[in-house]
Image: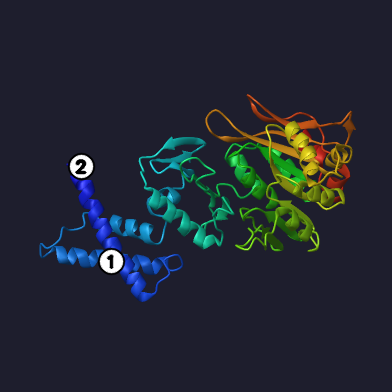
Amino acid sequence: MVVAYADAHGALVELLDARVRERIRADGVDPQEETALVRRIAEEAVRAHDERSLTGQVVPVPDPQRMVGELVARVAGFGPLQPYLDDPEVEEIWINEPSQVFIARQGRHELTTTVLTRTQVAELVERMLKSSGRRIDLSQPFVDAMLPDGNRLHVVLEGIARGFMPVNIRKHTLRATRLGDLVDLGSLSHNAASFLEASVRAGLNILVAGGTQTGKTTFLNCLAAAIPGTERVISAEEVFELRFPHPDWVPLQTRQAGLEGTGEVTLRSLVKESLRMRPSRIIVGEVRAEESLDMLLALNSGLPGMCTLHANSARDALTKLSALPLLAGPNVHAGFVTPTVAGSVDLVVHLGIDASGARRTLEIVAVPGRVEQGVIETEPIFLRDEHGLRATGGMPPHVERYRRANIDVLALLGGH
């Protein structure tokens, strides 16, 4: 009985889907740009079908409102994935193979009941990439793209991935836009949030580190929201993810090479170009390779900034940041890079996920600027224990910058 109902429902959806698409083609409607018009066409198609059902020629639509939503998702949205994209509790969606569609909620993943076909997945990817202007083919087997709603798409071409084209959609869920929101969510303590906001205003350089899905970009957004409105901000990212309120901000993103192999814009070139745009502050979405050298040189010259980095601890983040610039060329050596990191990074914020799946700030570490036997010295300012994120009594570097900004950092840290 259930199978018969599913078959009948599927046939009805296909019939109405075909009618809606026929009308869209006839009227020259762009489904991606004119979603409201697509919905009106779908409503008319469902209403016309229901009127015809009164004659007994066709079966009626059991739930017209739900049918309209399904048609809009198929034609103007992203089909079977649209309900997950619309669900605010879903943080990420990934497809390992057509019969395996996973989602993540509150840091935990689950296998859904959604089953797709290879054709459906290919059509979904093509539709998603169409809106981004990026492509995936033999010359570009990987793609990172931003969807119209701000979600991030990552696809690997079949052949690089065995047997199928895996798809990841990381949703941009704005649960926090300021450091105070992170306090409400339990990621930060009130004192730590006040200290970090003061540090941003004072112009300290901040590195946000953590593993995948620990909330690094969200945290960077919240830090950036504390930048004074009188400053000019230039940001550089692989794809646009940062979103924070600021009156003088120019966001930049990378670009793939064209079909002829030219026109690529790398993250390193964006960092270099940002320095020619009279910035008061630079933000790099995430450093992974040689662009770290150009960022460090900018920070070392007195230009305040912040960025994110994948690392397992604050100490590992500094070690990794000391190694990445070596990728820039054979003339770059550790004897130069390590002291530059020590002199450029002022604070490291390390994020993690606890056993319940909640994102937490695990430590905030100061970098005094000293190097002993090739190891960068650090001083913990806040550490998380069983009682929460607590001040350790440590002090940040460049206390004079806080004074110039009329901030009493001793009172901020001593009041815990």
Which image quadrant: the C terminus? top right
Few, some or many residues within 10 Å of mark 1 (<14, 14–19, 20+): some
Say what secondary structure mark 2 lies in. Answer: helix
Location of mark 1 (residue): 19
Q: Nearer the viewer, residue 76 or 209?
A: 76
Location of mark 2 (residue): 2
Say what secondary structure mark 1 lies in. Answer: helix
Cα–Cα span, label 1 and label 2: 26 Å
Confirm whether residue 228 shows in the render: no
Q: Nearer the viewer, residue 170 or 380?
A: 170
Q: Which mark is residue 256?
A: none
The location of residue 158, given as percent across then percent down, is 50, 46
Which image quadrant: the N terminus? top left
Callout 2, which amino acid?
Val
Callout 1, which amino acid?
Arg
Confirm whether residue 96 shows in the render: yes
The location of residue 116, given as percent across then percent down, is 37, 46
Q: Quadrant of residue 327?
A: top right
The residue positioned 53% from the left and 33% from the top of the image is: 357
The residue positioned 27% from the left and 68% from the top of the image is: 44
Above or below, 308 against 45 in this view is: above
The location of residue 252, given as percent across then percent down, is 68, 59
Question: In the drawing, does residue 95 fall left or right of residue 4?
Answer: right
